[in-house]
Image: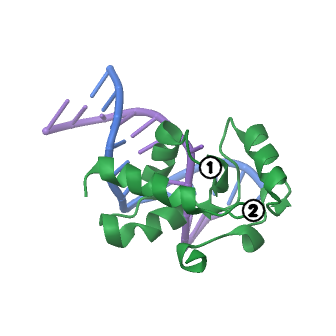
Chain colours: A green, B purple, C blue
Amino acid sequence: MTPDEYVEAVLDLVERIPPGRVMSYGAIADALAERSGRSSARLVGTIMARHGGGVPWHRVVNSAGRLPPGHEREARARLRAEGTPLRGAGVDMAAAVWSPEEGM
DNA sequence: GGGGTGACCCAGT
DNA sequence: TACTGGGCCACCC
């Protein structure tokens, strides 16, 4: 799988995250590990930063539920509008985390 | 080819 | 709670 195809796979998966739920960068990397042959949360973060426009990027947070730097206001507003369980500065991971298995 | 950087993550201190 | 060190991998000097 080329880096280009990996980008497609990541964006494709992000689009499937249902409203009100979220996925962490690591979970995404993990979910595509079999298909892509690599699991790098860091790479997913980079991809979202560069190609994240066009997909519901606000449904992707880090493992602690923290929102992406520089977009916290934006992300929070959208998440709140979708009814995502929030806690403190970020997302209530225990309640909001979603996995592909769960959505098929 | 070599080295720094980043919307990350986990384990230790 | 905050910081550190190691691992990760594409991108940009």
Query: Quarter of the image holding residue A10?
Result: bottom left
Q: Which residue is mark 2?
A: A20
Q: Is residue A70 above or below residue A25?
A: above
The crowd level at tag 1 (other Cα within 10 Å; few <14, some 14-19, many 20+) is: some
Q: Is residue A2 above or below residue A19?
A: above
Chain letter of disc 1 in the image: A
For this view, does A30 lie left or right of residue A5? right
Q: Residue A24, image x and y in percent?
A: 59, 61
Residue A89 shows in the view: no
Query: Quarter of the image holding residue A37?
Result: bottom left
Q: Residue A98, image x and y in percent?
A: 64, 71
Q: Please, what is the three-letter code of the amino acid marked with disc 2?
A: Gly
Quadrant (top left, top right, bottom left, bottom right) of the N terminus of chain A: bottom left
For this view, does A16 lie left or right of residue A90? left
Q: Residue at x 77, y 52 (%)?
A: A79
Q: Residue A44, image x and y in percent?
A: 47, 52
